[in-house]
Amino acid sequence: MTVSMKNLSVTIGNQLVQIQHDGVSQITIMDEPLGEPYEHKKRRVMNDEVHLLQNLPMMDFQEKIAMLFRGPLTYQGFRLPVSSVFEVEIEVASCRRLDELPLLSVMKSVIDGLNMEIVANDQLIFASTIEYKNLKVKPSPTKPPDLLSVALFERISNKRRLVHAVDDVPIYVVPKQEPLFFDYDNDAQWSFDVDDRRDSIADALHADGMRIAAGGPIKLTMNFEGRVKDKDLDNMAKVYFKLLEKLGLQAQDVHSIHLTKEEATKSCIRISLN
Amino acid sequence: MAIQIQNLSTLLVKSTAGPQFDIQPQWFMVQRKIISEVYPDFPNPDIFRIYLYLCKHFDQKDRKFKRSKEAICIDLNYANMNPGATRLMNYPPEVTAALTWLENNEFIVRTNTSKHQPFQCEILPVPDFLQSSNRFIGMKNMAYEWFSLKNNNLGYIMAPRQAFDDSILKSSPSVRKTWTDRKLKTLLLLYAHTWLEYFGGIDPEMVSIESNGMLRLSKWFCCSLKSSEKEIGSVINWFIANGLLKPVECYFVKGVYYGDTGRCQSPAQQYDVKIVLRPYYLIQHKIESKLMKRKKGRMIL
């Protein structure tokens, strides 16, 4: 099926950003990929530290992911953390529905589990995928509802080598959660240029007829090109996922996500929904 | 499956009459890692209780377990000193076996320089567990100190020493029957989620009571304890019935504890009312913390 691509340009500040889209499932934005600022930075209160409590089930989930890799790798004599260019593949098989397991947040939580402990820095992850499979059979009431598989690869020139993989581990998967902030009196958030830029692009696409229909399963692919070496894949994905949600995407329709980043002189974000 | 708390209205903490909670200066640290669906339980009840005893009596300053092997045997009821004797003649084999197991699997390291010296040990960060070969892998180059655990994203529980008194760790059949592994583990995990300044007690997302008296439990929480909701529900019910957890009605603003309904006016902001469980034994320095300054006066203690 050939779909005609529409061209569009948006003025953001004093910059003209070119966008191509097909109105339903393909978007290419000729712009430097944006990254989400960290949550605690959004609330930095002047002259005072921000008190917050991280979600403990999420922290424990991340600690479990680290252990599942650190145990066998230490046993094999690896010195951790390792520095290289990495790819991560995740599969979640669960009797829970996707509204309980938003895939991008699950991916984030798995990657944060590997970060620092296993891979020296999550900016070294250049590709990451996550797939969801629905389990029809419910496990017994004392067993975890999810089976998680995670494979970590090292990229060497054009090839990739498996560092370690864990397969079908019965575990209770906990997606990334925002921390709880102590100061309810001060919930003002800094506004960020990222949000304005993302909204300008979303508004322009919307005005030009771009709509994402509800219903799945959707395979979402996002490629980020530009000066992205030092940017987290999942932080960039978060920005454009929000953009897609503004155009009608429902998180629970997304059954798989494929992310890649590539250092390049020309910047561009390519998004496709299949 | 849902569990109903009987006589909730009489159990709810009220601001009348003297102190309602026991505030203790001494606390100890246990890693959350040992309570998990991907970590095996200790192979027998002796090892688990002796490990808790070692954690309880581990001196953070000198990084040493300060008691003797004899004290373990006597305090936990494995042996009695004969009348007139100055020391134990024999160590019960369960105690020796438990300490050997903990040492072989790198939960502890012996610090006495020779075998003939009295038992001394240091607690190590809990080892990783390797499922594929069913073995423990020690954590290298790390000390069992809160800041190094924190820097390595290893979570720990702060529990008041009194809540895990030696009397509930004893080896006698009647104590073991009451204080099962599941009860001890549940109580530890409840303390992991006790954040007075944020929740006024245990995180209501983990466990709370609805206004009609129904107990609400997190599936994640039960899963970490390798138990069903029904099993954990009845343990929590037992803790409430025995006064180890007390239901308190609290005001919450934006998910954060504001004060007890029986102790303060309702907040000016939009609020929720939740019934949280507050452990009977509380840690003093948690109540005296900087964050508690504004809230302490609104809390029944």
Image (cartoon, coloured by chain):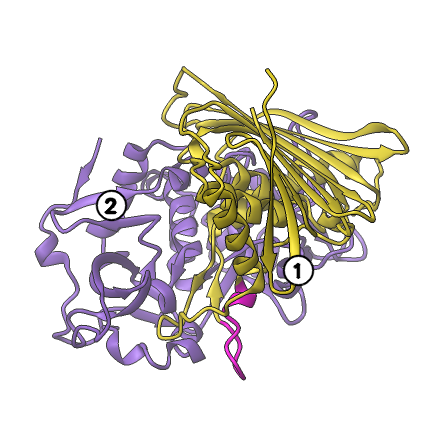
Q: Which mark is residue B244?
A: none
Residue at 32% of width from left, 60% of height from top?
B255
Q: Position of residue A123 (x, y in %)?
A: 73, 49
Regarding residue A94, the answer to whether it shows in the image is yes
Which residue matches tag 2?
B238
| Chain in yellow colour | A
Camera-nearest residue between B149 and A208: A208
Camera-nearest residue between A269 and A5: A5
Q: Position of residue B213 (x, y in %)?
A: 14, 47
* Image-based side of B226 in relation to B16, left or right: right
Q: Are marks 2 and 1 on the same chain?
A: no
Image: A226 above or below A42: above
Image: A80 above or below A169: below
Mark 1 falls within which chain?
Answer: A
Q: Residue furthest bottom?
A: A47
Q: Position of residue B251 (x, y in %)?
A: 23, 66
Please provide the residue range marked out in magenta: A40-50
Residue at 51% of width from left, 43% of height from top?
A205
Mark 2 falls within which chain?
Answer: B
Q: Position of residue B275 (x, y in %)?
A: 21, 57
Quarter of the picture containing the N terminus of chain B is top left
Q: Which mark is residue A15?
A: 1
